[in-house]
Amino acid sequence: MSAPRFGAIPSPVTRVVILVVTAVLFLAPIAALVEFSLRVGQPVKGVQGYGPAHYIAIFDPKSASTYQELFQGIGNSLVICAITVLIVLLLLLPTMILVELRFPKLRRVLEFICIIPITIPTIVLVVGFVPVYSTVVRIFGSTPWTLAFAIGVIVLPYAYRPIAANIAALDMVILSEAGRSLGAGWADVVGRIILPNLRRGIFAACFITIAVVLGEYTIASFLSRNVFQTALVLLQRTDPYVGDIFAVFALVFAFALLLIIGRVGSATRNRKAA
């Protein structure tokens, strides 16, 4: 006689079926993406040729002029990524730690401020950014890196949530008081106790920030800046394969970052267990 099952816990067979269906739905579009990016020429007698010719062409010096705008846009996006991550680490993270330790009554206010951008459509935010950027251009010039100020607002909800979830899993007040009682200063408490325990949330926030920046098109398009997405849209009009190729690169990049975050989280848990 089998043991009774309670609630909505699925059986082992059901779990396997759900896992297989989910894997197929997730992997099938990726496989189609890779297959299309490897196509070479038109089918001959119903047989499609495959090869890395399109990948090689992107990095071929003979095609440098064709892809110059794209690589310039990638460089601009990477600079914006670095600045936006610094905004998250130097502005949002210290504010969240300060509120948690010294001003817990402002926790809801901070959460409300950080969540607001996700409730407003990006196109509406851009309309508000346009007059603001007329002042930014006069001060800093019309360089692409200034988009980090606007994108820093866009990423607030996405960067706030993983850090907040990590903070909720800790008792930062007790940890800080324990460190202070042992003679540590606030710099040591934050640098050697709090930040190591928030490492996984910080890495996740940085990863999501990078993903949002690399995928941002609306703000850059309206403000006429050359970034990865705007250059990619223009180049796809003449090269239909380039979008798929860089989508494959983005998937590999995202997978590598997820592995790094997972390894960091595992290393943190192992040190705690030791």
Image (cartoon, rainbow, N blue to C red):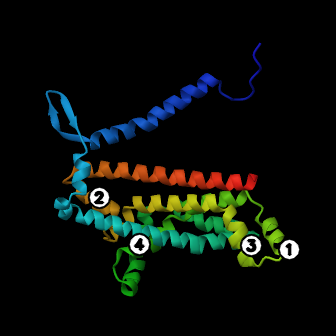
Of pointers 3 and 1, the one earlier in the residue sequence: 1
Q: In the image, residue 252 lies at what x, y percent?
A: 42, 50
Mark 3 residue element: helix
Q: Estimate the spatial distance between the alpha carbons at disc 4 and disc 1, rounded to whole Å.
A: 44 Å
- Tell me if residue 269 can be seen: yes
Q: Is residue 87 left or right of residue 96?
A: left
Mark 1 residue element: helix
Position of residue 82 relative to residue 268, above or below, is: below
Give the labeled residue for mark 3.
189
Marks 2, 3: nearer the viewer: 3
Of pointers 3 and 4, the one earlier in the residue sequence: 4
Give the labeled residue for mark 4.
147
Q: Estimate the spatial distance between the alpha carbons at disc 2 and disc 4, rounded to whole Å.
A: 18 Å
Q: Estimate the spatial distance between the alpha carbons at disc 2 and disc 1, rounded to whole Å.
A: 55 Å
Mark 4 residue element: helix
Quarter of the figure with residue 41: top left
Q: Is residue 181 left or right of residue 109?
A: right
Give the labeled residue for mark 1.
181
Give the labeled residue for mark 2.
232
Amino acid identity at mark 3: Val
